[in-house]
Amino acid sequence: MAALDYTGRTVLVTGGTKGIGRVIAETFGKAGADIVVCARNEPPQPTPGLFVRTDVRDPASCRALVDTTLDHFGRLDVLINNAGGSPDADAATVSPRFFEKIVALNLLAPFYVSQAAYDVMKNRGGSIVNIGSVSATDPQPGTAAYSAAKAGLLTLTKALALEWGPSVRVNHITAGLIRTEADRYTEQTASLIPAGRLAEPADIANACLYLGSDLASYVNGADLAVHGGGEIPARYVMNP
């Protein structure tokens, strides 16, 4: 994937200051793209490309983010909706405010940024990639809000692909367990994955690189599974 040339193209990565988002931004940068990253707070270290402080849960802030991208680079070719996540929470006791905030970050925010990006991309073409999760179809305890939002993101991707094609392609990546600097997974967890390991952030970044490129010019409304085959069902682990 590193051979793909993004010279002259501009890529916006939400949540691109750390973790998976940072690796995605760095990967596009190495391929020659002009990079814009955003987060709610100023990062403690330099970021790949241009940093724009943005609350992606706020539509006006998302519009300002896209406007700033145009002011600096004059175009927007690829949007990676990476910002998201949630701490575990018991559905029986979680507050309505918590639930609303998780849905806003993981479902509403990608729509707000995508809508602003579409206004720029619709006349010259572009690619939007939504970073989803296996939780959308295989939720775990403690993830009710997150799983519901990610399920919505998957369906939103397909709906936008129908409405915005052919000028703007909208695709989805179903990400599995990923090893990051905040890694809390063990090697025992990795043994439950058919691929035999956790994903590395580069696995997600390379998938984004493909979906944003001309190699994927006929890929629209797709869900690309980057999860190593999912997880081996417990009944097979307990009764090999």
Image: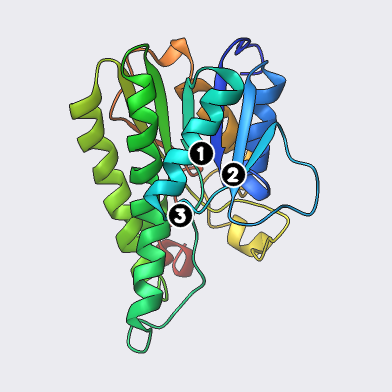
Residue linked to disc 2: 38
- CA gap, disc 3 and disc 1: 37 Å
Q: How far apart are marks 2 and 3 (CA)?
A: 32 Å
**Residue 81: percent from left, percent from top:** 46, 41
* Viewer-closest of 27 and 78: 78
> Which numbered disc flags the more N-terminal residue, 2 or 3?
2
Residue found at x 54% / y 49%: 54
Q: Residue furthest bottom?
A: 93
Q: Which residue is drawn at 49% across and 66% down?
A: 86
Q: Mark 3 points at which residue?
A: 231
| Label disc, if present, on residue 65 of the rendered structure | 1
Q: What residue type is labelled 1?
A: Leu
Task: Give the mark, 2 or 1, whose residue is nearer the N terminus.
Answer: 2
Callout 2–callout 1 Cβ contact below 8 Å: yes
Quadrant showing the N terminus: top right
The image quadrant that residue 30 belongs to is: top right
Q: Against 161, is 54 above or below?
A: below
Which quarter of the picture shows residue 28?
A: top right
Q: Residue at x 41, y 16 (%)?
A: 216
Crowd tier of the residue under label 1, counting other residues whose Cα lies within 10 Å: few below 14, some 14–19, many 20 or above: many
Q: Do the residues labelled 3 and 1 touch (CB within 8 Å)?
A: no
Residue 207 in sight in this render: no
- Residue 27 point in image, percent of width and height: 67, 28
Closest to the camera, between mark 2 and mark 1, is 1
